[in-house]
Each structure stands twice: as C-alpha cells, then as structure tokens.
Image (cartoon, rainbow, N blue to C red):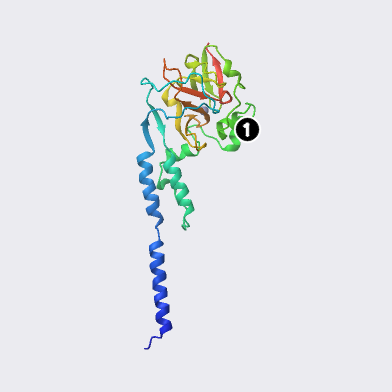
Amino acid sequence: MQVSCSSVAALHTAAAARRSSTSNFRPRGVVVKAQKHRSSADDVEVDGPAAASSSEGGEEAPHATTATARMPRRRLIHLAAATTAFVVSSKLSAPAPALASEFASDAKMAIMNRQGPVRFTDAEWQTKLKDEPYAYQVLRKEATERPFSSPLNAEKRAGTFACVGCGSPLFYSTSKYESGTGWPSFDSPVDAKAVTELPDYSIVFLPRTEVRCATCQGHIGHVFNDGPKETTGLRYCMNGASMKFQPAA
Ligand SMILES: [Zn+2]
C-alpha cells in the first residue's frame, strides 16, 4: 500500500494535535484534589483575632488600641480555599459538575450556604422576618445598618441580646460597652460557640472577620481588634437589626 504525502502530512497533523491536546489537558480531578488538599488543611484552624482594624462602616473607633496578650483565642473558620475550588472547577469545561463533597465537608458547605442547625428557605426567612425592620437584609443578605440607627445602640439595661432570627442568646449586657461607632458593641459573646467567625473578603482592600449567629448562620456583624484593652481587646461590632433585647427578669 502506498502512502501519499498528503496522508503522511495528515497523520503528522493529527499526531501534533494529539500531543497538543495532551499537553494542554488537565484532568479535572487533579485540580479539585489539589484544592481539596489545601481546603482540608486550611479549612478550620484555631486562630487569633484577624488583623482588621476598621469598624463596621469604615470609621475608626475611639477605643483603638494595640493588640493585647489577653485576647481569647477564637475559632476562625476559613472557607476561602473551598470557595476557590468552587470557582476553579466551575470554570473548567468539565462534562460533570463538581460535587461539593469532593473538596469540603457537609458542615463547611452548610456554613458556605449560610445554613445552621436552625435553617429555613430564603422565602421562609423573608416571611419569618417581615415584621423586623432590616432583619432579613442584615441576617440573610449581610447588609449593614446605618450607624446610630438602632435603638439597641443606647440599650443599657441588664439582659441578653438574642438573635432575632432564631432567638439564640448572643451577648450579655455585661459585655456591652460604648464604642462610639454607632453600632451596639460588645467585648465578647455569651459563649465562643454562640457565634461563627470567618474571614470576609467582600471588601478587597479591607479583610474583615464576619460574625454570624452559630445557630442559624445569620450575619450579625464583624469583630475587630480595637476593643477595650482592659478586657478582651475585641470589638464585636453588631447590627442592632439582627438582635432582640431580652431584659433580665
Ligand atoms: Zn440565629
């Protein structure tokens, strides 16, 4: 059988195409696995307070101090790696969608989806919170109320500040202090497990630490390192719209 020059050229072209496609081929599993590895290593770590130093709305608090050795170590949940894996895998033109279980635990995915032990659909949250001013926007959509707009900013009675979404206790009045920022401020939650703290990169040039109600994963505010140095050194800068005050009996 005679092989014509054009056939040889065609074979060369086909081989070159195969080589090219082979060298450019990136199996999706490799990328996801690499991300998964990073994710599992970085997902959860016991960390000190994040180094954000501005207040909820970008104003400086008058109580700004240097970091103190007495700051409690808090649990900071890192979801960034898992989020990256999501973006990377969705950009690949892979035939099958990436499975969440490939790179994050169900618990981490629940937090990414803002779902806690108490959970409702978005429509149910809207209905449940319809009579609470701004509560849905703050708890479920991470909105920030205007400073000095919440009556809770001036609340000085003894009692408990509870999540307006699920009723879980978040802060005692004994931890409340006047930060001058216009948002209800506390130096510590009722219990470290009452809140979920995780990095917030929504403002690229201002990394912050978001604080959520651990029970319903509703957004309640941010925590900063410029709290009162005589106690914890932390400032939990909260949205009054996300809480309800329960006076002590
Ligand atoms: Zn809640």
The residue closer to the viewer here, 159 or 155, is: 155
Residue under numbered circle 1: 127
Horizontal and vertical percent position of residue 53: 47, 27
Q: Is residue 69 left or right of residue 112?
A: left
Horizontal and vertical percent position of residue 157: 55, 11
Q: What's the residue at 55%, 16% (across, down)?
A: 246
21 lies above or below 160? below
122 lies above or below 95? above
Res 169 visible: yes
141 lies above or below 186? below
What amino acid type is highlighted by mark number 1? Thr
The residue closer to the viewer here, 147 or 58, is: 58
How many labels were placed on the picture?
Answer: 1
Horizontal and vertical percent position of residue 5: 41, 84
Res 168 visible: no
Q: What's the residue at 45%, 17% (across, down)?
A: 228
The residue closer to the viewer here, 144 or 65, is: 65
Q: What's the residue at 38%, 28% (across, down)?
A: 48
Q: Residues within 10 Å of mark 1 (few under 14, many from 20)?
A: few
Look at the numbered disc 1 and give the secondary structure of its residue.
helix
